[in-house]
């Protein structure tokens, strides 16, 4: 089972589950924890191979990684803790997992908060993925990860996010990186399906105005999906919860509380 941490609220019955992106860990939510603990029960997860969810000598994650199998990891924790439903907050690739969880287990998802959401890989993103596929077994994964991080978060004000993700990625093994990278073969058809299907679950997209790779598509999706709302944080890049934590916390908490 995944490693996870729980913070229980004295009064609230609402749960918020945080899902990090590829190469990160639950520690990327450190700027959210204090504010969200005041209002909700909190579930922090380390996805397989990340943070403290490292495979043991007997590799429990040895099967092929798929978005469905990684989504099922999250549901296993919910079941173990008897959490019937939760709000889900994700960043980057974590938003794909949340959307997939909503597709497969819609009754478990009260709402989706999608920070730095990925709903389409544009031409530049696809070129990056292809380069990664070619070099993933040749070049040290950390070189690739630093390159990807710079392309996705290129500006000076994105530096903190870049360094945080690279620091977390150093904790991965090359073998683990390759397993996750193989998921890219699933991404395009999955995202095409997600864009086409309005799942009608309350969804709050919170994006950086400088998230050049992914914001244009989210603008289109939020206009066509009936339960979707978009908030753009100007002068901010891909990892909005790290770059603009006070705005992120205020807007997301306000959104979740207004759903009641």
Image (cartoon, rainbow, N blue to C red):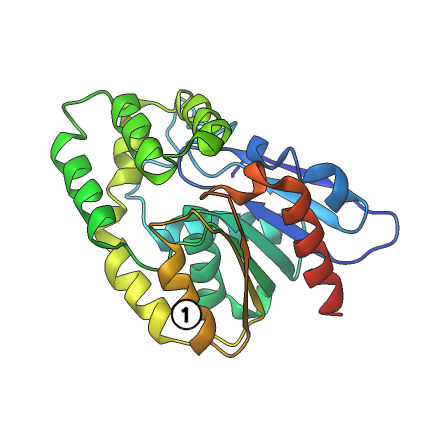
Query: For residue 162, which quarter of the picture?
Result: top left
Whether residue 65 is situated above or below residue 150 in the rendered picture: below
**Residue 217, how many percent across, how many down?**
36, 63
Tell me: residue 167, above or below residue 46: above
Residue occupying image coordinates x 37% and y 54% = 214
Q: Is residue 201 visible?
A: yes
Q: Residue 23 in the image: state x and y as whole percent.
A: 40, 33
Q: Is residue 27 left or right of residue 122?
A: right
Q: How many numbered markers are drawn?
A: 1
* Quadrant of the frame with the C terminus: bottom right
**What is the x, y in percent for residue 212?**
36, 49
- Residue that appears at 23% across and 20% down: 140
Residue at the extreme left of the image, as rendered:
134
Instruction: Tell me: 234 left or right of 213.
Output: right
| Other residues around mark 1 within 10 Å, as few (<14) / some (14–19) / many (≥20) | many
In this rendering, position of residue 143 left or right of residue 216? left
Residue at the spot 11% in from the left edge and 35% down from the top edge: 134
Q: Is residue 82 visible?
A: no
- Give how far across and how far down residue 184 sits, in percent: 25, 47
Vertical relation: 141 (above or below) 224: above
> Label 1, on which residue?
221
Identity of the residue drawn at 76% across and 51% down = 40
Circle 1: element type = helix
Q: Position of 130 compared to 218: left or right?
A: left
Q: Relative to the observer, which residue lies in front, 24 or 108?
A: 24
């Amino acid at each position: 089972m995944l490693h996870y941490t729980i913070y229980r609220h004295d009064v609230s019955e609402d749960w918020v589950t945080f899902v990090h992106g590829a190469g990160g860990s639950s520690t990327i939510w450190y700027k959210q924890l204090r504010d969200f603990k005041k209002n909700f029960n909190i579930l922090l997860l380390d996805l397989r191979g990340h943070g403290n969810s490292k495979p043991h000598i007997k590799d429990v994650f040895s099967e092929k990684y798929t978005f469905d199998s990684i989504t099922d990891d999250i549901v296993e924790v919910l079941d173990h803790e008897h959490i019937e439903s939760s709000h889900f907050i994700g960043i980057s690739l974590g938003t794909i997992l949340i959307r997939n969880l909503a597709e497969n287990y819609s009754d478990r998802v009260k709402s989706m908060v999608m920070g730095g959401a990925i709903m389409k890989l544009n031409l530049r993103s696809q070129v990056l993925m292809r380069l990664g596929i070619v070099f993933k077994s040749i070049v040290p994964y950390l070189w690739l990860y630093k390159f990807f991080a710079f392309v996705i978060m290129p500006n000076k004000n994105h530096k903190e996010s870049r360094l945080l993700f690279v620091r977390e990625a150093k904790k991965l093994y090359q073998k683990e990186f390759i397993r996750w990278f193989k998921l890219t073969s699933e991404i395009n058809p999955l995202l095409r399906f997600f864009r086409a299907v309005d799942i009608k679950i309350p969804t709050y997209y919170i994006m950086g105005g400088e998230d050049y790779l992914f914001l244009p598509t989210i603008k289109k999706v939020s206009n066509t999906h009936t339960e979707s709302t978009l908030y753009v944080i100007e002068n901010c890049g891909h990892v909005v919860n790290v770059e603009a934590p006070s705005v992120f916390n205020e807007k997301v908490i306000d959104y979740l509380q207004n759903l009641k």
